[in-house]
Amino acid sequence: MADVTCEEFRELASELALGILPGRERAAALAHRDRCSTCREHLDALTTISDDLRTLVPDTEPPVGFETRLLDHLHARTRVQRRRRRLLATITAAALVIAAGLGGWSLGTLTQHQPPTAAPVSPSPRLLTATFTADHRDAGQAFAYTGTPPWIYMAVDTEHDTTTVSCQLQTTDGHLVTIGQFQLSNGYGYWGTPINLDPTTLATARLIATNGTIIATATFTT
């Protein structure tokens, strides 16, 4: 592979950070990283987030076919073992939210919009996590990043047949804000967006159906 540009490096960086980039592309990307301090810092940030997310991979496997749908949507560049793909699916998605510029998106849907003005955040970025529950069972995971810009990403798997849900955040002082909508397919979906509030003040995230029913709730602890 020829020398890569900074733009090409950023397209490869998430898979490089996860260790799943094929050999020739990996070699070219590493050569560029060694020459470019800006891209090196970008990769370091992705690697830190990826390492944090690896510790959050659940013991149970996602629904059959999940990894194929997600990795195909994100244009995965290489085949990896089936078990490995299942473990890395959610991690890859979250890392690519950062690499893609933190724009709002969901599985099968790209939402075009301008990110909101970043809210004040913690000087030392952290990745906050919360588990979604629905009908008294685990139903997914939410991740909130306290860096600049702050963002939230979620993956949910419910038994509801609702196709469209709104995401409502509540802060510790009781403030409520609806940050957007995304689609579910057979009860599950994946979505992320920048947020215009300090993630360290998050108390809960709720997924609400169009009829007002609360589908799932996640409680953050800071």
Image (cartoon, grey):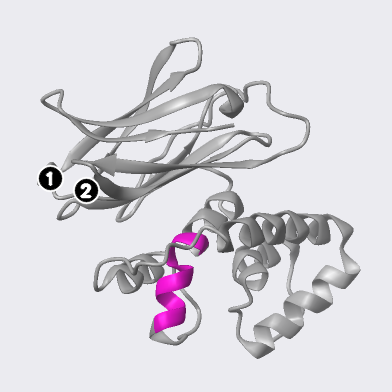
Residue shown at 45%/86% (left/top)? 79
**Percent position of residue 95, x then y:** 57, 57
**Percent position of residue 190, x then y:** 35, 51
Query: Around disc 1, counting alpha carbons within 10 Å, would you say few (fewer than 14), some (14 to 19), or many (20 or more)?
Result: some
Q: Amino acid at mark 1?
A: His
Numbered label attached to residue 216: none
Q: Quadrant of the N terminus?
A: bottom right
- Pointer 1: what residue? 160
Q: Amino acid at mark 2?
A: Leu
Label 1 secondary element: loop
Label 2 secondary element: loop
Horizontally, residue 36 falls left or right of residue 45, namely right
Q: Who is closer to the viewer here, 218 or 39?
A: 218
**Label 2, label 1: how many angstroms apart (C-alpha)?**
9 Å
**Percent position of residue 139, x then y:** 29, 49
155 drawn magenta? no
The part of the chain drawn in magenta is: 83-91
Q: Nearer the viewer, mark 2 or mark 1?
A: 1
**Percent position of residue 127, x then y:** 61, 43
- Pointer 2: what residue? 184
